Image (spheres, grey):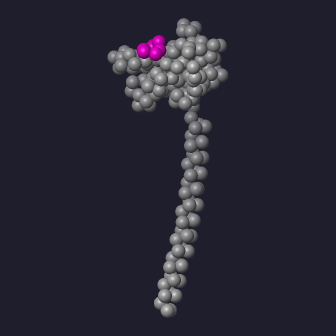
């Protein structure tokens, strides 16, 4: 009988030890989660905008961008390859003008020009060109909506930065 009592005591102690270790692990995971969240918030706060932000006027005289959906893409950019189909889908539901800028030499952007040409007026220019400068583009992909007063309504590097399209 004393062996059985000793076994029960040992199992109880082991269960208590396991419970304490579990609480310690859970506490440590919560701390790590908070640290990661703080780091993400800090990075997103420090991340410079990829182009003009909402409320910024577009200073461009050569091209009418009033009410336009504008997208900047590069064939050498992996995220661009994901965003081009999303941009095309968004553009098909957009009621205004659609302008797509393909950045790079003509031979490299040929496929992109064809794909985007189905839904947009496509301009091929290098980084630092007039449209890049007018929109303050610093990377790819970059998308924005411009309102009728030539002011950026929404912008970002993901399509989710733009407002949802109104259903017809």
Residue nearer the viewer, 91 or 154: 91
Return the x and y of residue 148 as percentages of the image width and height. 63, 13
Return the x and y of residue 156 as percentages of the image width and height. 55, 28
Q: Quadrant of residue 117?
A: top left
Check the image and report above or below for 112 versus 82: above
Residue plotted at (45% across, 14% down): 122
Check the image and report above or below for 12 versus 152: below
Residue 121 on the magenta span: yes
Q: Quadrant of residue 53?
A: top right
Instruction: Look at the image and tell me whether residue 125 can be seen.
Output: no
Q: Residue furthest left?
A: 107
Check the image and report above or below for 164 versus 110: below
Residue plotted at (58% across, 47% down): 37
User: Dividing the image into 4 quarters, which one contains the C terminus?
Assistant: top right
Residue plotted at (55% across, 57% down): 29
Specify the segment rendered in magenta. Answer: 117-124
Return the x and y of residue 15 as percentages of the image width and height. 53, 74
Residue 20 on the magenta span: no
Residue nearer the viewer, 15 or 108: 15
Q: Quadrant of residue 144?
A: top right
Instruction: Look at the image and tell me whether residue 110 can be seen.
Output: yes
Side of 47 where 83 appears, left or right? left
Residue plotted at (58% across, 56% down): 30
Q: Residue furthest top?
A: 62
Residue nearer the viewer, 45 or 143: 143
């Amino acid at each position: 009988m004393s062996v059985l009592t000793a076994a029960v005591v040992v199992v109880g102690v082991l269960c208590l030890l396991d419970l304490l270790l579990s609480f310690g692990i859970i506490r440590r995971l919560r701390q790590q989660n908070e640290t990661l969240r703080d780091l993400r918030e800090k990075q997103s706060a420090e991340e410079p905008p990829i182009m003009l932000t909402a409320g910024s006027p577009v200073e461009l005289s050569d091209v009418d961008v009033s009410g336009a959906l504008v997208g900047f893409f590069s064939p050498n950019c992996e995220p661009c390859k994901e965003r081009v189909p999303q941009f095309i889908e968004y553009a098909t539901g957009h009621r205004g003008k659609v302008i797509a800028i393909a950045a790079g030499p003509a031979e490299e952007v040929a496929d992109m020009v064809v794909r985007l040409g189905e839904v947009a007026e496509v301009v091929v220019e290098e980084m630092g060109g007039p449209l890049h400068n007018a929109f303050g583009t610093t990377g790819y992909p970059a998308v924005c909506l411009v309102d009728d007063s030539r002011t950026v309504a929404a912008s970002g590097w993901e399509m989710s930065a733009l407002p949802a399209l109104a259903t017809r």
